[in-house]
Image: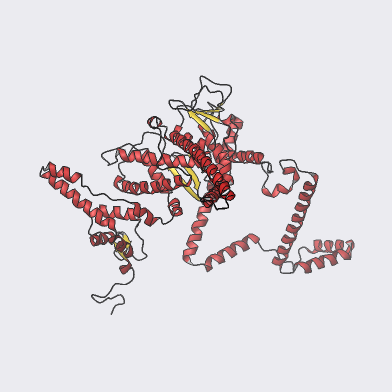
Amino acid sequence: MPKHYRLPGKKKEGNAAKYITRSQAVKYLQVSLSVFRKLCILKGIFPRDPKKKVKGNHHTYYHVKDILFLKHEPLLEMLRDIRAYEKKVKKAGMKKNWDLVERLNKQKPTYSLDRLVKERYPTFIDALRDLDDCLTMVHLFAALPAVEREHIQVGQIHKCRRLSHEWQAYISRTHKLRKTFLSVKGIYYQAEVQGQTITWLTPHALQQVLPTDVDYNIMLTFLEFYETLLGFVNFKLYQSINMKYPPIIDSRLEALAADIYALSRYFDANSRASVVESIDVSSSEESELKLARLQHHPPTNEHGALMNLVEDVGEKDEDDGETTECRNFFKDMKFFLSREVPRESLLFVIPAFGGVVSWEGEGAPFPESDQSITHQIVDRPTQSRKFLSREYVQPQWIYDCVNFRVILPTDEYLVGRVPPPHLSPFVDNEAEGHVPEYAEAIKRLQAAARKEVLPLPGAGEEDLGDPQNLLGIIDRAEEIEAAEKKRKMAILQKQYLDELKMELEGCNYYDRSNVSKQKDAEGTDADANVSKKKDAEGTDADEVPLPDLKQIAEDADNMSKVLISRKKRKLLEAMEIGKERKRAHVKLLKERKKKIDEAEKSG
């Protein structure tokens, strides 16, 4: 009997019992492929990749438990009812029974995704961890045009804009924004909410062109779930800062496309109202507390008063050091935006770091002629009218200052000049092996702002012990201590190298040191005679040449590769190829920089 022979009717085992193909799952659930895709997206079920694919490599596999999970989903019955309803409407329309069509349109079945959101994200932290794709999708559809051919409705666009502006208003109000980067794809943002790092991408404010090779039905299904998820998250976040949700914004500012500013005004109005209400409540509680103490009776709301005090202390201690730094970064600065700059992005970034901002147009909080404006953001080659009391900079200056947490000099960002390179805050230059020149200049500006000590250009970290390579003022005691520390390190390093050399020769370091002391005691004459004899006889026959240290290291590396498994060896080789590719890229960048410097010197 063959090894893999199975009798007819015997129960399946292994991967054949754990996984089924997509066509088998659709047939088992008795739904269409589009309904199956929608159900999987809403429930968060994705295809699997089994080690042994029973039906072949050209099939898509799902776990059997996932399909059984879908079988008992109440949403499946609702989708079947919607399918039957659409058939009834179509049949009535074909029969031209318009009364029945109108009656059916009023009875259209609907469903809610609230239960699925709570099911997939049991805690609020779980929802925050999975918010990156949600925010990117919502911001993308907020910038798309409404296209009836692709079933992109106007209501969905307005809802995405509202949700995205509510999220940005919360981040800006609580000063949770940490990084931002302008790229060709769009603008990257990174915020830190309740200890979770959230990164999302927003498209540029340009006319979007819809590609034809994208399945918008799948994207709209994802959007349907993400809208519900972001609505829950915004509700929870607004409740955490004692704000009503959904917010009520000024319709005039909303018509002028100043939604974020309208939301900021809503925050200010609610905060003032809450302060007044808390003052009234605290005064009444204080009077009641005094009256109860005089009458030797406990107050009715003493526990509530203590809880309010605890909550106030908790709110004061909630902000960490980075949030406080972001709140005071653009403090006492007023910005004015010209009409050619990305207004929506700057209205989000500048208030998130404590700045006051206005723009050119209706609904602005203050006009361009305000003398208290410190910076005006422009993006044109020339400026016809200038105020001497302010500085004119390009928009990149805002983003660079925010990323590196230092107010950069405005000389490189003036109107008409080519700005310095816009460095990404998401790249670790030390890990990449190449530190751009402008990054080193910014690092020195940061050290000067924090009053730190850094080595001069061209000196490494090992030269920090040399007092002459230090940038700053150091007293004499610290200078002597640094020099002594460096001398001791040099002695220890020399001793370690001597021990390593003696070990390769096959003798002990301490025996060699005793031999050297005895040789020193013999006198200079004996040393001279020995040296003459050696010169006469040539190289001693007993002397053994030192082995090549580089060759020994290569042999040990090869032996370690032989002992590991093939899979790990392939992985190690791939890692080495990646490192070599990175080193080649760094070398290419240095060569380009060298050529540019030579061309500038010759020119």
145 relative to 226, above or below: above
Say which quadrant the N terminus sits in: bottom left
State the image coordinates of residue 98 (x, y, percent, origin top left): 13, 41
Residue occupying image coordinates x 45% and y 52%: 129
The answer to which of 491 and 208 lies nearer the viewer is 208
333 relative to 167, above or below: above
The answer to whether any part of residue 140 appears in the image is: yes
The answer to which of 360 and 499 lies nearer the viewer is 360
The answer to which of 351 and 296 lies nearer the viewer is 296
Task: Tell whether 405 sits left or right of 222.
Answer: right
The answer to which of 134 and 212 lies nearer the viewer is 134
Residue at the far top: name it: 384
Residue at the far left: name it: 95
Task: Please count the marks in the image.
Answer: 0
Task: Tell whether 312 sits left or right of 94.
Answer: right
The answer to whether any part of residue 180 appears in the image is: no
Residue occupying image coordinates x 69% and y 50%: 462
State the image coordinates of residue 479 (x, y, percent, origin top left): 78, 46
Residue at the far front: name it: 295
Residue at the far bottom: name it: 1
State the image coordinates of residue 518 (x, y, percent, origin top left): 85, 67
Which of the 4 image quadrants contains residue 552? bottom right
State the image coordinates of residue 513 (x, y, percent, origin top left): 80, 66
Which of the 4 image quadrants contains residue 251? top left
Residue occupying image coordinates x 56% and y 64%: 558
Say which quadrant the C terminus sits in: top right
Q: What is the image's colouring?
A: secondary structure
